[in-house]
Amino acid sequence: MSAPIESPTPVVTPVAPEPRDSLWKSIGLNVRGSVMMVALLLAVVFFQLTSGGVMLKSLNVTNIFLQNGYILVMALGMLLIIVIGHIDLSVGSVAGFLGAIAAVLMATYHLDPLLAVAMTLIAGGLIGVWQGVWVSYLRVPSFIVTLAGMLLFRGATLWMLGGQPVGPFDESFRAISSGFVPEIIGRIPDPFGAVDMVLLSIGSIKLVIPLGGGDLNLTTLLLGVLLGAAVVFMGWRSRREQVKYGFSVPSMGSFIARNAAIVLGVMFIAYRLAGYKGLPIVALLAFILIGFYMFLTLRTVIGRRIYAVGGNAKAAMLSGVNSKLMVFLTFINMGVLAALGGLIIAARFNSATPKAGYGFELDVIAATFVGGASAYGGVGTVAGTVIGAIFFGVLNIGMGIMSIPIDYQFAIKALVLLFAVYFDVSSKNKAG
Amino acid sequence: MQQEAAVPLSDVLLEMRGITKEFPGVKALKDVSFSVRSGEIHALVGENGAGKSTLMKVVSGVYPYGTYDGQFFFKGEECRFHTIRQSEHQGIVIIHQELALIPHLSITENIFLANEQATHGVINWGLSHSKAKDLLAKVGLNESPATKISHLGVGKQQLVEIAKALSKNVELLILDEPTSSLNENDSQALLQLLREFRAQGIACVLISHKLKEVESVADTITIMRDGAVIESLDARGGDVTEDRIIRGMVGRDMTHRFPPREANIGEVLLEVKNWKVAHPVYSDQMVINDVSINVRAGEVVGIAGLMGAGRTEFAMSVFGRSWGHVVGGQVLMRGKEVDVSTVPKAVAAGIAYATEDRKTYGLILINDVKTNITLANLGGVSSRGVLIAPKEITVANQFRDALSIKTPSVKQLAVNLSGGNQQKVVLSKWLFANPDVLILDEPTRGIDVGAKYEIYTIINRLAAEGKAIIMISSELPEVLGISDRIYVMAAGRIAAEMPAAEASQESIMKAIMRLARAGAEEVVL
């Protein structure tokens, strides 16, 4: 396979010029993801302005993770489901049901929390098996299967709990959602002191980055440094690889600028978290999962096959990809992550309630689409999904701080979803 | 006698002047002038990407006024179409290569789609059906207007499209590759229909790769290349030959349409015995009936036959039962029976199948070239389930160079490649899976002359490396030009087997007809 083939005729084939890697593409963001990144920053700035500097206080930054961790966790599962070309409307109900199982196991049967967590995760996997069999092997559309699942597990939750909240739980279990990484190294005083940094000042409007206000958790700062270094290292390694194979890469300047921005962002978040109680356990869990799913989607054979099935199921099947198995696996994965989501929710409220999880599927699905996943399958990134989920988290906290009534909050979130997807669709149409 | 077609101004129906159309990065049309006279059949030929379809999309309002430069006149009046509806209102109707019919609706419903025979929004079904019936009679389609489109074969669907065009009082009918998916009989019937339309004064622009047809039916032949009109030939004298057209298309003479082939044939690699396959829905209908074939190392075996003969169905059923229900038969590799019940098992047994429909079944268009190339053999670019990116890029670059895939980089999306290059990506995918037997289903469909030659060269080289090649093709010259041995399939059976050296187009057609006369039921898929 080495001799070049002689062509008898000059074949003139118009080919589109190679798309230059945009600023965000190299960290796995597409157009919608990049726009959402900018929108996220704008939203933060907006709430920071309107809240008089409260938005970025340590407590609120911590709350973004505490209050939205479960959305992020379940959105990672939803991403794979949507990428492979399906949908799961049942995640909210399933999470509620699994939270109820964990609650009953711990509160009624007094099982060890660790054992209860393990059993709940397995139960989540089994629910995934149930829905996955219907979708992939019995070929019922996932919309229908999971719509049925939504009702089924809503009913099952009521039955399991007997219509009553079940709780409270052991402190060790509640740590899942309210605990923090222990202060192994100790705390240091804030080097910035208790001064606010004024970025912008127009008349009475001031854009303030609050600094200081106490001492800092060293462990969290150190973890921030490690994360930042890891991101820069992986970016640099990938860039070197691209150059080696002659692909076009963003200029060194933009590479440095981008990495500086990422490190700054990571360090700022770490600094804010360190100023309160440190890194929430749920955030640590989320970061580990994010890392794992980035690896799965970008670097593994299974990840590649999931994208292939979503991109063109028939072509994937004819290339020897076991499409049904892939769909089946993504549903099992979703079940396990829904179990994790359910555990976090139960731990957060210190009880499982019959209504837990209601409507969460919509937040999860919205976060995934806002993060750039395509409703037609085959397209979507972990990085985008994370941004989508954090964006909704910021919206929730920001609107809460501003005391925007709940009716407006729904409408605002709806319009964000609509415009984000519209923007993506229209930019695709323009591209031809 | 090749001269510029003299176009008397009086009966010019369509005149286009200085049309230029740009896409991002590509100038698809460069200052094109083109005219069609009333009541003529005007063939528009050229390699893929020459700009034929783009030009016709300007005429029919698919590209609205303002998205191109230049102007055009229909019946002497300047046209500025913003929608397809406006062009249809003027009597310009385009029938695209991919038929735009809705499978679950009836013939009548399709014909009058968006043009419903209704008063105050209530459809008059009696009137609709009777009008549809008249239109069907005009195109010679003997079907009830209530028949669902999904029950018709491709040839009949094409006729429904034409009936739909007639319902719009068409004066200029544009057909984009109307016969590309039709068998010989249906193609001839369609061309005859165009001749009848000509007699009735309907002009027709025919875009086609099938130069024999063009030669036989066209009054004027316009050749395009690289977005420009090269020449217009008056073909009424019947002295414009296929070779003459090809010369215009590629810019010089094509002395050899097929690369020379030196066969070095070895042991029997694949043998399929008494293969029987039932229709996936109608399980009592046998689509493949007792087919036995074999292919040897280093051999190119052609499977000729008409559309619907069961060739694709046969190949796909062997390749991991991707089609139908296999009811009987054996598959042997090097004399040993192998399990080919799933695609991965078939691939493991050393069989690969490159589909006839590369966009639907062959490629993941939204993925890049390297992802497509490695899809069938991800094990080859990974270790313990983890992909090795440098290895993947190296592999993709090797195939890009070996098969001369024209793309700026292997990170280009498959959708941005031309048909010939897409086909090379599909071939690369299967070559990387390193099969012993490669089944190529219509490997050159819809790709231009130059790229075809390259594909033939690749086939030859693979055979020389000792692989066994089965090539399914509806183009008889291609089957004859490439194969060492030919099986003729008709109605789900093997009608004949002959060495290519002794075969001719006539002998193949005769074999098909003989089987048809023997009373075998025509299988309509």
Image (cartoon, coloured by chain):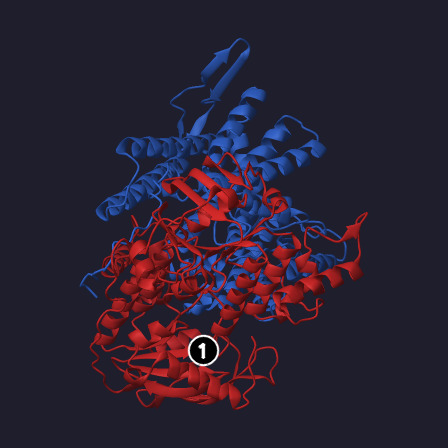
**B304 and B267: which one is in front?**
B304
Q: Is residue B364 above or below residue A271?
A: below
Q: Residue A31's spot in the image, x, y percent? A: 45, 39
- Chain letter for the red part: B
User: Which chain is displayed in blue in the rendered image?
Assistant: A
Q: Quadrant of the N terminus of chain B?
A: bottom left
SS under mark 1: helix
Residue B373: image quadrant is bottom left
Q: Is residue A124 left or right of residue B251?
A: right
Tell me the residue at 25%/75% (across/down): B463
Up/down of B179 relative to A197, above or below: below
Residue A142 location (% of width, % of height): 61, 60
Residue placed furthest toward the top = A203
Q: Which chain carries label 1?
A: B
Taking depth in this image into account, of B423 and B173 the one nearest to the observer is B173
The residue shown at (23%, 83%) is: B265
Who is closer to the viewer here, B80 or A233?
B80
Relative image position of residue B422 (x, y in whole percent) = 36, 58
Horizontal relation, residue A314 to residue B502: left or right: right
Give amino acid for label 1: Arg
Q: Looking at the image, is B491 positioned above or below residue B388?
A: below
- The answer to whether B497 is drawn above or below residue B348 in the figure is below
Q: Inspect this view and state whether residue B312 appears.
A: yes
User: What residue is shown with label 1?
Assistant: B311
